[in-house]
Image: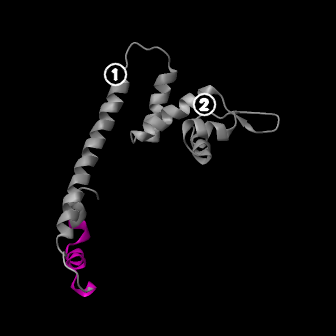
Amino acid sequence: MKIGELAQLARCGTETIRYYERIGLLPPPIRGENNYRRYTTKHVEQLRFIRNCRSLDMTHEEIRTLLDYSKAGPTPDCSPINDLIQEHLQHVTIRIQELQSLETQLRDLYQQCQHPGQVSDCGILENLSKLPLEERSSKSHLG
C-alpha cells in the first residue's frame, strides 16, 4: 500500500509516518520501481502500536524499548515491560499533581479580578507583577 493508505488505516498524517521512519520507530518501506514507498500490514500494525503508545503519552524512547521487547519473541520474563509501565505511571502521577497545583494557582489568580473595569485596575495583572517568577514556578513544581 502507499503512504496515504497507511495514513488512513492508522488515522494519522503522512508527515507523522515519515517522521517515525526518520527517527527509527517505523522501519523504512520497500521502494517500488517507481521509487514510491510500499507499506505492508506489518507497518500498519507497528504504526498502530506506536500511535497507541503515544496516546498514553509515552516518549519515543519508551516506545522504542517496547518495540524492541515485542520483536524479541517469547521471553520468560516480562517484568522489564511492567517496570517501564510502572515508571511511566509514576511520571503521569507527578504530572497530574503538578497540573492540579497549577489549576489551584490559576483559580486563585482568577479570583483577583472578578469585576469589569479598566486594565489599569486589573488584579490579575497586578498579582502577576508582584510575585517573582522563580517563587511562582517553585510553588507549582513546573519549573
Report the amino acid beneath label 2. Answer: His
Residue 25 in view (yes/no) = no
Please state which of residues 36 and 68 is positioned toward the viewer in this rendering.
Answer: 36
Q: Which residue is mark 1?
A: 79
Q: From the viewer's perspective, tell me whether residue 101 is left or right of residue 15.
A: left
Report the amino acid beneath label 1. Answer: Ser
Mark 2–mark 1 Cα distance, whole angstroms, equals 27 Å
Q: Which mark is residue 1?
A: none
Q: Which residue is mark 2?
A: 43
On the image, the x and y values in percent for residue 120 come to 25, 87
Q: Residue at x 60, y 30 (%)?
A: 43
On the image, the x and y values in percent for residue 111 come to 17, 70
On the image, the x and y values in percent for residue 109 come to 20, 69
Q: Which quarter of the figure has residue 23?
A: top right
Residue 61 in view (yes/no) = yes
Q: Which residues are magenta?
A: 119-135
How many C-alpha atoms fall within 10 Å of the one at disc 1: few (<14), some, or many (≥20)? few
Q: Residue at x 46, y 24 (%)?
A: 69
Q: Quadrant of the C terminus?
A: bottom left
- The colour scheme used here is one colour
Residue 133: in magenta span: yes
Q: Residue at x 44, y 40 (%)?
A: 54
Q: Which quarter of the figure has residue 84?
A: top left
For mark 1, give the secondary structure: helix
